[in-house]
Image (cartoon, rainbow, N blue to C red):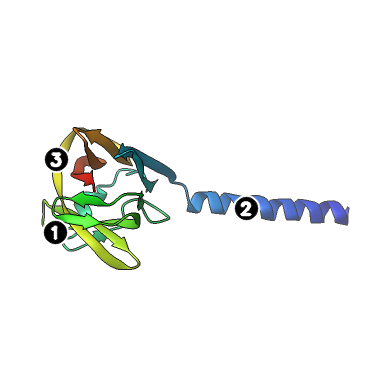
Amino acid sequence: MRRTAAVLSSLLAVSLGVACSASAQDSTRGKATVTLAGKAIAVDYGRPSLKGRDMLGKAAVGDEWRMGANSPTTLETPVGLAFGASQVAPGTYVLRAKKVSATAWTLKLVRDGKDAAEVPLETSPVDKSVETFTIDLTEQQGQGVFRMTWGTLALSTRFSAK
């Protein structure tokens, strides 16, 4: 009887630990990829849901957002990239977004704790609200397009392989 109670107690503790761990990280991970210059460029990111909130609208001017949930959003590139006049070397970068005015955002690429580039993002409304944060990488006319969408807002920029 004591042994059965001990086993049940252990199973309950394990079950509660798994449940707590799952709820602490309830957003899924997403991955967006595009091929430029024959090389795959990838973004790995968390995919939180709005759950009735307006997260981008609530951000104050000057706020930086880590774009996603749980682990940092990362860009991995085996080739150098140019975002307009800003260039970054091959490697892995943490991506952050910064609200620079009531209607403008920039994309920050951070490497080894230092800003490697800050790129203006084009802001555009979307027709239908996007519940789950989404990042897309696509190729258009030989250039890459980075686009993140959440709620009723899309933020995007173009880049090329160097």
Residue 49 x, y percent position in the rendering: 35, 43
Residue appearing at x 32%, y 63% in the figure: 111
Residue appearing at x 35%, y 41% in the figure: 39
The residue that label 3 is drawn on is 124
Question: In the rendered structure, are the residues bearing label 2 and label 3 in contact, judged by CB atoms less than 8 Å apart?
Answer: no
Q: Secondary structure at mark 3?
A: strand
Question: In the rendered structure, are the residues bearing label 1 and label 3 in contact, judged by CB atoms less than 8 Å apart?
Answer: no
Q: Earlier in the sequence, mark 1 or mark 3?
A: 1
- Which residue type does callout 2 highlight? Leu
Q: Is residue 66 above or below residue 157?
A: below
- Which residue type does callout 1 highlight? Val
Residue 69 x, y percent position in the rendering: 38, 52
Of the numbered discs in the image, which one, if any, rests on residue 16?
A: 2
Q: Is residue 155 above or below residue 106?
A: above
Q: In terms of image quadrants, where is residue 42?
A: top left
* Separation of residues labelled 1 and 2 (CA atoms): 43 Å
Q: Earlier in the sequence, mark 1 or mark 2?
A: 2
Q: Is residue 111 above or below residue 73?
A: below
> Is label 2 or label 3 in front?
3
The residue that label 1 is drawn on is 100
Confirm whether residue 24 shows in the render.
yes
The answer to which of 10 and 1 lies nearer the viewer is 10
The answer to which of 151 and 97 lies nearer the viewer is 97
Residue 48 x, y percent position in the rendering: 37, 46
Q: Residues within 10 Å of mark 2 (few under 14, many from 20)?
A: few
Residue appearing at x 42%, y 55% in the figure: 70
- Which residue type does callout 3 highlight? Ser
> Is label 1 or label 2 in front?
1
